[in-house]
Image: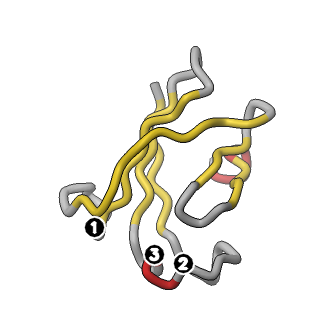
Amino acid sequence: MKEIVIKLTRDTFDYKFKQYEGKFFHATIDENSDIVKYKVTSDEAGKELKEFGNTHIKDGNFLFIPQLDIYIDLKKMK
């Protein structure tokens, strides 16, 4: 399993939902599944939970962030 943390900023991602500005998207990626468990927090450590759920990976390397309605390329995150 792989853990990733992405800071949600408008400088990095083109989205219109300002309530997610500065929040952190934490994802647990299991290489054996396209389903990804995630949570959105106010802090990078992941302790101040705002919401959580499941999302998916498309075409092997694009992670869908439902709150922003965007796909991000996991290869560019490395």
The answer for how far apart the CA atoms under marks 2 and 3 are is 8 Å
Point out the tag, 1 or 2, that comes first from the N-terminus.
2
Viewer-side label of 3, 1: 3
SS class, disc 2: loop
- The amino acid type found where label 1 is placed reads Asp
- The amino acid type found where label 2 is placed reads Thr
Point out the tag, 3 or 1, that comes first from the N-terminus.
3
Q: Residues within 10 Å of mark 1 (few under 14, many from 20)?
A: some
Left or right, 36 with respect to 22, comes to right
Q: Are marks 3 and 1 in contact (CB under 8 Å)?
A: no
Q: Residues within 10 Å of mark 2 (few under 14, many from 20)?
A: some
- Between 14 and 17, the one nearer to me in the picture: 17
- The amino acid type found where label 3 is placed reads Tyr
The residue to which callout 3 is attached is 20
**Residue 9 coordinates in the image, percent (x, y):** 54, 78
The answer for how far apart the CA atoms under marks 1 and 2 are is 13 Å
Q: Residue 10 occupies which quadrant of the picture? A: bottom right
Q: Residue at x 25, y 57 (%)?
A: 45
The residue to which callout 1 is attached is 43
SS class, disc 1: loop
Q: Residue 25 occupies which quadrant of the picture? A: bottom left
- Between 69 and 7, the one nearer to me in the picture: 69
Viewer-side label of 2, 3: 3
Left or right, 71 with respect to 47, comes to right
The residue to which callout 2 is attached is 9
